[in-house]
Image: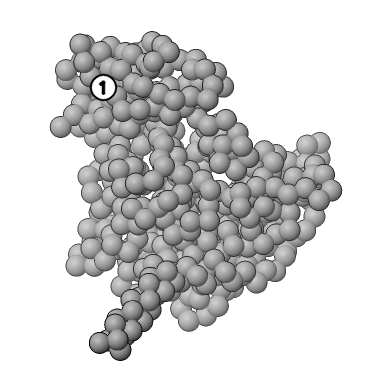
Amino acid sequence: MKRLLYTLLLLCTMTAISAAEQVGGWDLDKLKKEIPAVEWLKKEGSVHSLLYAGEAYRGNPTQVFAVYASPATLGEAKPGERFPGVVLIHGGGGTAFEEWAYLWAKRGYAAIAMDLGGSRPPECKTDPKTGSPVPSERSAKTMTRLPNGGPNQGHPEKFDSITAERNDQWPFHAAASVIRAHTLIRSFPEVDPERTAVTGISWGGYTTCLAASLDDRFKAAVPVYGCGFLHEGESVQKPSIDKLAERAADWVREYDPSSLLPRCRVPILFVNGTNDVHYPLDSYLKTFSKVSGEKHMRIQVNMAHGHQAGWAPQEIGLFIDSKCRGGKPLPVPGNPRLADGKVSVPFESALPLKSAQLHYTTDTGVRSKRTWKSVDATVGGNGVTAPEPPAEANTWFVSLSDERGAMTTTAIQLKP
């Protein structure tokens, strides 16, 4: 009997260890502990560039191109000063943006941005007066394919590769490359490894969802636009997943954020627009609902879709500051309540609220083409009140803005 109990205990222990080491195809223990080998390409100027070791691709070792900036590379650091770190993930057709890393360095962060398409962009020129990067043209024509780069970032690599070996699939590489970049930046002497965050735009927001679900060392995550449930509703990715036929369920299970976000314990802020054609609000709300840990939402009426538009909202930096630098947190709205012809929303805010609004649409049809209306709400000591949305309103939410102009919103309300 004792021998049987010992055997069962051993099996349970081995299973627990295996589960801790492996999630899907990612060896998380290895990705978190092994610092990837680095080859520095440029270590002068405000933004440096490097190659770091990636996952094997088609049986061969790979390198990932990245750029790095910090107050130290800008010449603005004090001797021995350490900084919080941030990992920056570009969207579809994007690359390692020097100007993005520079912006975060100016904010006081050590920032690393990698290329997830197996290539490297042309080097930015530098403004002689400010030292800031001046982006040159970055397109398929100007990108240079790395001789040992990983998979490209096209739809065949993102979806069709589900029939290939795990190491030849883009989503696997993308998430692994982000975690490797995180492990690398945490190893830099000037970086405080206990104060790091991740943010990404569009496909980078999608990958941020994966990374935040796999890597619990992050203190904050901000996916912009990107979400899960790409296989449902009006998602522009749905046709590509449908074409996978019997392998579609495999792709969703392995790589859709809806399958991984239930394990996310990193505080997360979802940022999107009301009319985003790539990540519609239905999918966004369902993705948000999958997170059981700390979560927040910022929905902007008619927010444009793009890299510059995606890194522009000040709330991204303020949220990460609140988790990594002791900054004041964003307002936290409670669940809206409908009663007596009014919407009431309780809230918590470290700073006084400046304004609030009710946003709704009565249009039907494709969400990206619906017209939205906004109505001012009243801010009181106990909460926010607004007129009840009209009966024909099918989607609505309430936004709160503090004295910094920093905005958060309630979860999206969908009419059954």
Residue occupying image coordinates x 75% and y 45%: 71
Which residue is painted at 39% across and 27% down in the image?
Answer: 333
Q: Nearer the viewer, residue 4 or 177?
A: 4
Q: Residues within 10 Å of mark 1 (few under 14, many from 20)?
A: few
Question: For this rendering, which residue is in front, 370 or 393?
Answer: 393
Q: Position of residue 299 (x, y in %)?
A: 39, 31
72 sits to left or right of 239? right
- In which quadrant is the C terminus drawn? top left
In the rendered view, does 167 fall on the left or right side of 6?
right
Q: Residue at the right extreme?
A: 79
Q: Is residue 272 above or below residue 201?
A: above
User: Which type of secondary structure does the marked residue at label 1 adopt?
Assistant: strand
As displayed, is residue 23 above or below residue 370?
below
- Is residue 73 visible to us here? yes
Quadrant of residue 362 in the image? Answer: top left
Q: Mark 1: which amino acid?
A: Arg
Residue placed under numbered mark 1 in the picture: 337
Residue drawn at x 23%, y 49% as measured from the top left:
232
Percent across and percent down for residue 33 are 57, 69
Quadrant location of the N terminus in the rendered image = bottom left
Whole-percent x, y for residue 146 in the image: 59, 68
Q: Is any part of residue 138 visible from this angle?
A: no
Instruction: Indicate whether 196 appears above or below 150.
Output: above
Rendered location of residue 14, percent (x, y): 38, 78
**Scheme of colours in the image:** one colour
Number of callouts? 1
